[in-house]
Image: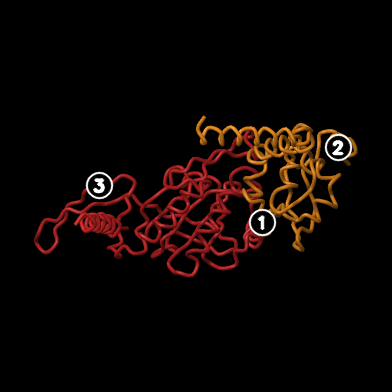
Chain colours: A orange, B red
Amino acid sequence: MSWKLASCLIAVVAILFITACQSDENLEFKRYYSSGALVYQQHCQNCHGAGGEGLSALIPPLSDSIYLRKNLTALPCYIKNGLKGSITIKGKTFEDVMPANDLSPVEIAQVLTYIGNSFDNKLSTIDEQSVQKNLASCH
Amino acid sequence: MRNTLIGLVAILLWSACKSGSDKQKLPIYGNRAPVTKMVNGKQVTDTIYQTIPSFKFVNQYGDSISNKTLNGNIYVVDFFFTTCPSICPIMHRNMLKVYKTFKSTGNFKIISHTIDPKHDSVPVLKKYADKLGITDNSWWFLQGKKEDIYTIAEKNYLVAVKQDSSAAGGYIHAGYFVLIDKQKRIRGSYDGTDPKQVDQLIDDIKVLQSEPDQMIVQ
């Protein structure tokens, strides 16, 4: 057996080991995150931008980790029913209306996981169960 | 010897590309008609190009803006509405790049027509412009009679717009940025939702700015 083939084999085995070692939690996160990226492109990106940068004082950026953390339980409601009234993001006031988005609970969980872990945000996985629970208590 | 040859070929290729870009010219869109006239006893044939006809709208400051206000300007046109949930934010995010590139060059304007003049009154447009960060006279948000806006969009700037209650926000419209030269002729049309095409628009405006001023056909 040539050295090249042998080293290839070792590499493959190593990769298998690494993926096997990934926890279920991590896999769940990756599934939510990658599906969330697609939901984001289809439903959020036009307004909030590919980099979550928003648009001047019209549309808020999605990179205010403190706001996201504070409003974690209300975020599913904001996505599902839209958002009216004035909010403060990164010290700036935004007062325009966000339209409602007719997404399923799992899509909301996916897109929140994506947003919560992109644009310098670091939240954990936001799963379907917690979204469903929070949706039940929307105002 | 071999190296010299490669070097020579490289130089040739480079200069070929360079002379190509030096002579870059933008097409002129629309119908054209030949006109024959006598100049100093000689018969001369000239071309009359299709141009943007006269119009009158009001901008976000309440100033009346007509085709004459834009005389001597290169300008970019689009159609939007402030409550548009679909393509408008992405169009104006891209248009901001155009604005920032040319706002201080002079003889350049951006005009964005609202296709929902009933909701988008002058104060609504002013607020929108303020929030977008536009406080000067390089980018105007225009309001006017609905028929006038729809007619000029479809007949002259060749951008489709239509009211449709089944569409998101109540209107269907195309997100084109249309480039108009100082002679009021269409020189380009770009998908305002595509950053690559908007970069092309920015390059084309530079080409247009370096074009020698011609006799203004009116």
Q: Work out whether disc 3 and disc 2 sit on a shared chain.
A: no
- Comparing B51 with B73, the one in front is B73
- Between the C-alphas of marks 3 and 1, the distance is 42 Å
The x, y position of residue B18, in whole percent, is 28, 59
Tell me whether the residue at label 3 lies in contact with that at label 1, contact meaning CB atoms closer than 8 angstroms. Answer: no
Residue B117, visible in the rendered structure: no
Q: In this view, which residue lies farthest toward the left?
A: B41
Front in this rendered view, residue A114 or B195: A114
Q: Which residue is mark 1?
A: B124
Question: Mark 2, chain letter?
Answer: A
Q: Residue B62 lies in what quarter of the image? A: bottom right
Seen from the viewer's position, the closer of residues A57 and B107 is: A57
- Give the residue displayed 28% in from the left and 55% down from the top: B17
Q: Seen in the image, is B175 located left or right of residue B13?
A: right
Q: Position of residue A1 (x, y in %)?
A: 52, 29
Name the residue beneath numbered marker 3: B33
Instruction: Say which label, 3 or 1, has the lower sequence index.
Output: 3
- The chain identifier of the residue carrying mark 1 reads B
Is B198 on the left-hand or right-hand side of B30?
right
In the image, farthest residue toward the top: A1
Tell me which amino acid carries mark 2.
Ser
Label 3 or label 2, whichever lies nearer to me, is 2
Instruction: Give the residue at x 83% y 51%.
Output: A69
* Residue B198: % across, % down: 48, 52
Q: Nearer the viewer, residue A128 or B77?
A: A128
Q: Amino acid at mark 1?
A: Val
Mark 1 lies on a secondary structure that is: helix
Give me the disc on residue A130.
Answer: 2
